[in-house]
Amino acid sequence: MPQGPGDTDDRPRRAALVYNPIKVDAEALRASAETLSEAAGWQHPLFFETSVDDLGDGVTREALAEGVDAVMVAGGDGTVRAVAEAMTESDVPLTIVPSGTGNLLARNLNLPLTDAEAMIRATFEGDRLPIDIAFAALRRDDGENVEHAFVVMGGMGLDAAMIANTSGDLKKRVGWIAYVDGAARSLVKATPFRIMYQIPGRRLHSARVQSILIANCGSLPAGLELIPEASVSDGQLDVVIFQPKNALGWLLVWRRVAWDNSFLRRFRAGRQVLSLRTKDNTVIYSRGEGIELQAEEAQPVQLDGDEFGSATRIRVRIVHGGVIAVVPKGPRDRQALTGGERMPRLSPSRHRRGRLR
């Protein structure tokens, strides 16, 4: 494993910077990486640009083949996803330099979102934190099988359609708020679909849903908490099923995410209120080391906010501690990393038994 601060390995060390030239100020970023590498006594860093044909996984493998001791990634959530996929179980630490609009993994790790220099410096003197990464094996309608990683969350159904319907130009102008427009476009045509799914060690379920999310992290932009107790380092994935039946159901979904999870759960009195509230099944939560699900017809899929076409079947596995993330040195808020109060799990009586074909 690459040497950390205070280690006595005298060999010259070198970092690589993988960046999306569309998302960052490449000249300033490279200059900062050069200056801070020199100050830390490391060699001149290697630089790799992503492209339409290489989202970051290919150039990251090139960097690892060069024997680098650390990799920095600067780009959107898709770039971070691709680089993390290539670095899985490499034992080479990964520094996330927040860029782009979402920065969802950076948010969930409580990293500074507006101080690129602080994160570059952490490459040489920060702490190392093993985090989980998930791999989703997708089966296309034509029988093709592909597998890709995600570090934040993947989903099938309405959430993926929302991403597909979000204008790229609008996203560049206003950031994550553009997803509101994508959601409005998607809700007009949204129809529920039947899935069968199974979490390892649990029985098979059948449900009619609008969307199903498989999450490694729980926090979203604007302070929204989809899964307040989610942990990025517990070896578990959180499954969230949305099954509103009408407009009132969507209001209940919004209340659960924007009010219950993101506000009331922060306070003891709020949690007491929630414990007395009548339960509804518009949003169902569960947790496990993976999940296998099958839809009656091909449905759109997204991984970390990027479109990945449509699939009829998804099998998700988690690699516990598969990526070594770099965080600034010092005490950290561990809530997002260790999880908090657990939410009620899935009630078997609300779902029918079935059999995956």
Image (spheres, helix red, strand yellow):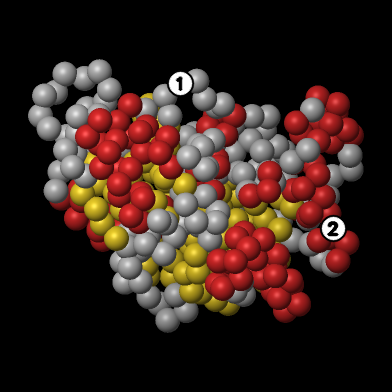
Q: Is residue 159 above or below residue 203?
A: below
At horizontal 74% and vertical 41% (from top left) the residue drawn is 262
Q: Is residue 11 above or below residue 141?
A: above
Q: Nearer the viewer, residue 307 or 180?
A: 180
What's the amino acid at mark 2? Leu
Tell me if residue 203 can be seen.
no
**Mark 2 = which residue?**
251
In three-dimensional space, the C-alpha distance between marks 1 and 2, rounded to whole angstroms, equals 41 Å
Q: Is residue 127 above or below residue 18?
A: above
What's the amino acid at mark 1? Gly
Horizontal placement of 311 versus 123: left or right? right
Which of discs 1 and 2 lies nearer the camera? The answer is: 1
Q: Nearer the viewer, residue 335 or 181?
A: 181
Horizontal placement of 28 versus 307: left or right? left
Location of residue 60 (image quadrant): bottom left
Horizontal placement of 344 versus 49: left or right? right
Q: Position of residue 173 (x, y in %)?
A: 60, 66
Q: Mark on residue 301?
A: none
Q: Position of residue 10 (x, y in %)?
A: 11, 24
Q: Position of residue 126 (x, y in %)?
A: 37, 28
| SS at badge 1 | loop
At horizontal 55% and vertical 66% (from top left) the residue drawn is 172
Whichever of callouts 1 and 2 sits on the residue coming sooner in the sequence is 2
Tell me if residue 11 can be seen.
yes
Q: Quadrant of the N terminus?
A: top left
Find the residue positioned furthest to the bottom: 142
Q: Position of residue 286 (x, y in %)?
A: 63, 45
At horizontal 47% and vertical 69% (from top left) the residue drawn is 308
Query: Dot 1 surroundings within 10 Å: few (below 14), some, or many (20 or more)?
Result: few
Q: Mark on residue 330?
A: 1
Query: Dot 2 surroundings within 10 Å: few (below 14), some, or many (20 or more)?
Result: few
| SS at badge 2 | helix
